[in-house]
Structures are given as C-alpha cells and as structure tokens.
Amino acid sequence: MIPITRLRPSSIAAQYHFRLVFATPLCYLRGDFMPRLKSTIVCCLFWVFAAPLVAHSTTIVVKLEDRRIILVADTRAYTDSLTTTKQDFHNSICKIVALGNVGFAATGFPDYHKSQNDSMSNWSAWEDAKTYSALHKDNLVEMADDWGRAARKHYQILYSMDPSRVRRLATVSGGNILVQGLFAGWDTKRLPSLVSERITLDESASPSIVASRNIYAQRDLPYTTNDHTKKLIEGDLAKKWKKTSKHFPKSERDWRWIEFLIQSTSEHDQTVGKDADVLEILPSGSDWLHKTSCPAY
C-alpha cells in the first residue's frame, strides 16, 4: 500500500506558507545510459519540503482557487553531461500536460527509451498519466495511485535486472528520487487539490522501490518550486507589477501576475526562462490561457 500523508491548511507548514521544492531534475533516460555514463537531463519540477535550492532548477507556480487552478511553468530546460559541467539550454520545453480537468507533470526519470539490445520496455510517465486519468476521471487520488503503482513496477523490474544502475539514477536525481508525478485537479468533494506520487530507492526497505503519496490543499499564496520565486511571492513586487500590469487586460491580470513571477525569477536564475505556458484547470475541463511550447503530449 502506498503511504499517505495528508496536509491540511490548519497544519503548521501551511500556517507558515511552506513552499514545495523538488530536489531532482527531470531526466530523459536512454537504455544505453550506463555504458556511456551520459544522459540528457531536462530541468523540471522539484517536490521536497524544506530542501535546499537545487542549482539547476526551473520554476513551476500553482495557484489553487475555489473554482479553478492556475498551473504555470517556464519553458527552459537544459542538457547536461554527467561527466562534465557543460550545459546547453533550450527554451521550448513543455512541462505541463492537460488531461481534461487535471494537469500533470513529472520529474526525475519519467521516460525510458530502450536501446537496440535492451530487454526493458519503453515507458513514459506521461503516457501512464493519460491512461489512468481516463480510468479515474472523477477520482484524482485513485488516478495518482494507479500511476504510482505503474511507475513503481517499472523501477522494480529495472532494479531486479540492474540494481547498480538504479542506484546510480537515485544518486543523480538527489534524495533517492527516481520519478515523481504531480496531479493538479479536483478531489471527490470538488475542492482544488495537488496530489504528488513519488517513487524512491530505499535499500533498507523491502521491496527497495518505495512509493509515497502526498496531498496538498488550497491556500492563499501560490505554491512554487523555486526558491527565488518564493522570495518574490513573499516580497514586494507591487511597484514593478503595477507598471507591467498596465499592458494586460484586467481580465488577465490574475494569471499574468503568476507569469510575471516566473519572468522576474529568470532575472535571478539563469536556469529559468522568461517564456511560460499557462494552463487553467476548471472542474469541467482545462484550457490554455497562454501557450509557448505546449501542448506537447
């Protein structure tokens, strides 16, 4: 059974406006990863409480409102060799997947592409999200749990075939995280909710591939994955935003403010791009308020 941690607005963390900081980059994994000791790493979400800011980060901002959820992500990613410090930035990566009245994103190693002589099967966290969102359209937690079981199974198979490789992946990602999926949508009471499923390596446990679920509730401030963005949310950008907001219709200024937070973050963090994709999630469905690189899945 997947352990459950429920976070309520009345909790101490919520009272102190905790932030969500993922401690692993999103990485595309090829079957020939270990022989080459090289992989393409694409910065994306990070989901660990109170973790130090990862040097190679991105920023995702999620605003839970009474009747809608705003999910915004920058489009910058980078490729990085595990054996060098060379980085190659790309500014056209879609990090958000729209699944009806749910938004999904993944981090860690969410995509496996087999090599020619590889006995593993291809696997995609995004494709699994599509599958389980179709099976559980009205239950966000069951949707996320099925996704977590499938992701855990994938890594259990990989671990049984090549445990040293899985150890390497867990080390690369940080926090022993192998993959993590984030579902933003509506719970069974039609309240806005974030559900995170995390797959980690814990060789002191049996089995060693562990799945855990966390649920995050509505609060006044947006959630963010970036420490710079958090400081901007809690700081004073009023004067700068007042000047910038004049360029937008009043009907757009609520979500444009979140986009503005990302753009402002990019001035402090080179791994964050100025361009962003914005998804509005309603109980009845979702709509792209602004598309730069999405949809891609």
Image (spheres, helix red, strand yellow):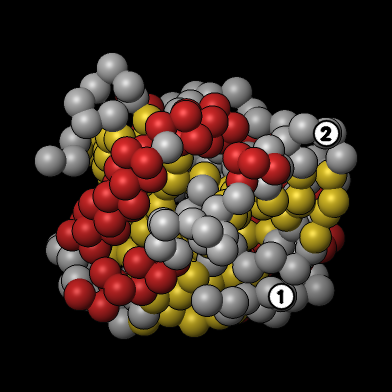
Kindly state the secondary structure of the residue where label 2 is placed: loop
Q: Is residue 214 visible?
A: no
Q: Nearer the viewer, residue 53 or 254?
A: 53
**Count of marks, rendered view:** 2
Please name the residue shown 87% across and 40% down the image: 86
Residue 2 occupies which quadrant of the picture? Answer: top left
Check disc 2 and report the residue beneath it.
84
- 279 and 167: which one is in front? 167
- Name the amino acid, label 2: Thr
Picture coordinates of residue 29, whole percent (x, y): 57, 52
Give the residue displayed 70% in from the left and 43% down from the top.
Answer: 36
Q: Residue at x 27, y 50 (%)?
A: 153
Front label number (2 vs 1): 2
Amino acid at dot 1: Thr
Q: Can you say whether 174 is above or below 86 in the image?
A: above
x then y, percent, for residue 155: 36, 45
Disc assigned to residue 292: 1
